Amino acid sequence: MTIQCISPIDGSVYAKRETLSRSEADAAVARAKSAQVEWAARPLADRIALVQAGVAAVGAMNDDIVPEIAWQMGRPVRYGGEFGGFSERASYMAFIARDALADIEIEDSKAFRRVIKRVPHGVVLVVAPWNYPYMTAINTVAPALIAGNAVVLKHASQTPLVGERMAKAFHSAGIPEDVFQNVFLDHQTTSDLIADRAFGFVNFTGSVEGGKAIERAAAGTFTGIGLELGGKDPGYVMEDANLDAAVDTLIDGAMFNSGQCCCGIERIYVHESLFDAFVEKAVAIVNGYKLGNPLDPDTTLGPMAHVRFADEVRAQTAEAVADGATAHIDPADFPNDGGAYLMPQILTNVTHDMRVMRDESFGPVVGIMAVKDDAEAIRLMNDSNFGLTASVWTQDTARAEAIADQIETGTVFMNRADYLDPALCWTGCKDTGRGGGLSVIGFHNLTRPKSYHLKKA
């Protein structure tokens, strides 16, 4: 089978790769399992140093990586790629590794040594998405390697060059080729490998349906699974919020990367006293965007990664307008709209009966609703099948935390949005998935506890 990356810039075939046969995939896993034993036996400090060197080697490629990302998934070159977040996450996990992986000593007396150690799963499969192809991959790749696992990386077909770049960088830094492998697999081979217990742990970031397929493949194998799936993240602006800061951050969170952010803002609830002013400021911001070729440094909004993604957002928007929603952005101001190039849109007079307020959009559209109080905002924020992040805006920290306690989500931000803090667990609930990455908990999920009860006499 051939995997093709169709560039959203011009619809051309930007890259294509052949997938591994089942026998080739089995051989790759066998090499990983064999190499993992020696890798795990290396001192932790050595593994940390090699991963950090691999990260730095990726950074040295950034001038080439940035236009590659534009060609593969459409993000404008003006934003400079992902190395800042890529490095931040890997560096933090390296910083906490010694403490996070430390033995828990219960007793070391003349009679007994009792201790709990954290040991690697063995081979970890990382299935990474295209929207932030470097940062999403490193979330698991760095801590998995540091913890002593071998890693097999299967990247999205929209961004096939990312895994190759990472493998080249990590190998050049001294990480053995069999310890970190980039592979191209079709869906069936991936499922068959999981079903046959090829991996000790599987981390998948992608669609809800993709997550269900991973769970079905792993059923009965007791393989550990981490899933980050869809999102419909809300923002809530209270009457005491800094209005300018709230508008700037929430609209950027809704539109950046053409709305293709795991924790992007897809619905906004504004206290009725600020609603009109919020919408006016939001429309002004969006009208200042330039939709166009992402290789142009003046472009602020590039194409979506694929025409079918843009068409889904168009369908949600058209359905909402047909059902009474008000569209505030004039298509005449975005003449490049068409195909994968999708103009941004702000909708009001929306309801939760509309798909645009319920289904994941993953594009540059956001619905804004007025609310009368916290109770109404909490009810609407929780009226979703998803739960990744929520953003609340107020000057009152105690009030924000009290509201946060009632929101069904993985992370709650106050006065910020669309950010991943590597010191905190990256997790979700409901259809957003299960498990947790980064932080100390990320290391715990990429290892298993092993108890030692040693009687000395």
Image (cartoon, rainbow, N blue to C red):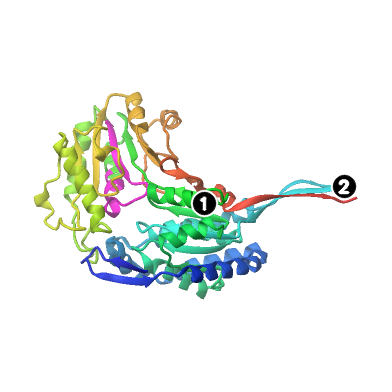
Q: In the structure shown, which secondary structural element does the residue marked by tag 2 occupy?
A: loop
- Closer to the camera in the image, 35 or 184: 184
Picture coordinates of residue 128, whole percent (x, y):
42, 58
Picture coordinates of residue 186, whole percent (x, y):
41, 63
Q: Is residue 389 above or below residue 82?
A: above
Q: Is residue 254 magenta?
A: yes
Residue bearing the label numbered 1 = 218
Q: Amino acid at mark 2?
A: Ala
**Neighbourhood count class around disc 2 (C-alpha, 10 Å): few under 14, some 14–19, many 20 upward:** few
Please tell me which of labels 2 and 1 falls first in the chain: 2
Snapshot quadrant of residue 430: top left
Numbered mark located on residue 348 in the image: none
* Residue 414 makes an appearance in the image: no
Q: Residue furthest bottom?
A: 172
* Residue 343 makes an appearance in the image: yes
- Closer to the camera in the image, 106 or 98: 106
- Looking at the rendered image, the disc whose residue lies closer to the viewer, 2 or 1, is 1
Q: Residue at x 19, y 53 (%)?
A: 342
Q: Is residue 385 above or below residue 52?
A: above
- Count of marks overlaid on the render: 2
Snapshot quadrant of residue 13: bottom left
Snapshot quadrant of residue 305: bottom left
Q: Amino acid at mark 1?
A: Ala
Q: In the structure shown, which secondary structural element does the residue marked by tag 1 occupy?
A: helix
Q: Is residue 164 left or right of residue 220?
A: left
Point out the stretch of residues depicted in magenta. Answer: 251-270
How far apart are the alpha carbons under marks 2 and 1?
42 Å
Q: Residue at x 45, y 62 (%)?
A: 189
Picture coordinates of residue 60, whole percent (x, y):
42, 71
Residue bearing the label numbered 2 = 111
**Neighbourhood count class around disc 1 (C-alpha, 10 Å): few under 14, some 14–19, many 20 upward:** many
